[in-house]
Image (cartoon, grey):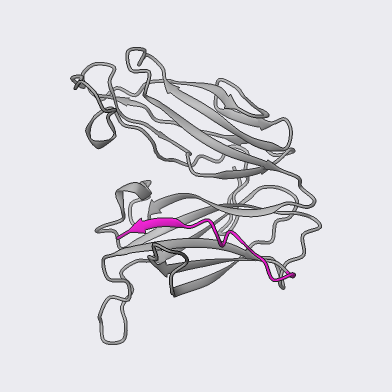
Amino acid sequence: MRKSTIRWNVLGILLSAGVLTGCGDDAPVGPVIPCTGDCVTEFRINLENLILTINDTVRLSARPVTADGRQLGTNWSVWFGPLRVDSSGLVTPLAAGRGGILARGGGATDYPNFVAQSEILVVDPDTSAQPFIATFQNAATGDTLLRRNGFKGVDSIDITVSYVIGLQTETLGPPALTFEIRAKAPDGIGPLLSSKTIPAPVRGKAAFVTFRVNLTERNPDQSRRFPPDFYDFFVVLPLADGRLLGQLTGYPVSF
């Protein structure tokens, strides 16, 4: 798999994020079932939104781990929509539209809730455009960070974005994504606290770009620029007609 600092080839890319777990806060409401044997206590898959064109493929990976520490195999199936997936997790889009892939830990037959879902948007390579955050990782360790758990105690994170820019899409200047950190605003988009521009040179097919964000950045007086709190992350694509694709799709986080 060929990799550069701003772009990863789609075929064979392995992303991971968290989904359902067998114990704790994510357990379904109802009678408590002892978490033993094939009870899956950890299940990771590339879950966050992905965007592809019809000519792309992507290989999904999952890591279902049981209560006694065994890693199970993964059974892949199409959840819905115009997609195909093989036994190795290789996904092939069949037509434009929204679809989903379902992953189930092999052997965890007594726990039907232990599945992971990956939603994928398949778009036209000529006219469509959209960025989505695909995964968060601890920059120091490389471990996947679950957005719903927050990033407390993490100094910096690597963010990978899945994007498509159509061959005919007119952007504002050279194609680039804008990453924003905004203060949490319950009633809308909060004040802009920080932003950075990331080149996005690939057109007409899915691409990935990875960049680093320092969460413990300091002001000149050594106070934290982002005190522990709740924030919204945005990744937007400015178009020539003034629209900002992704402006309404925020990623609530805490750190």
Q: Total of numbered circles in the picture?
A: 0
Residue reaching furthest to the front: 187
Q: Quadrant of residue 62?
A: top left
Which residue occupies 55% across, 37% down? 119
Front residue of 10/170: it is 170
Whether residue 57 appears in this view of the structure is: no
Q: Is residue 128 left or right of residue 28?
A: right
Q: Is residue 96 left or right of residue 88?
A: right
Q: Position of residue 205 (x, y in %)?
A: 71, 48
In reply to whether residue 244 is colored magenta, the answer given is yes
Instruction: Look at the image and give the residue range highlighted in magenta.
Output: 240-255
Q: Position of residue 14 (x, y in %)?
A: 51, 39
Q: Is residue 239 left or right of residue 231?
A: right
Q: Position of residue 51 (x, y in %)?
A: 62, 45
Residue reaching furthest to the bottom: 221
Q: Position of residue 104 (x, y in %)?
A: 44, 22
Q: Is residue 208 left or right of residue 211?
A: right
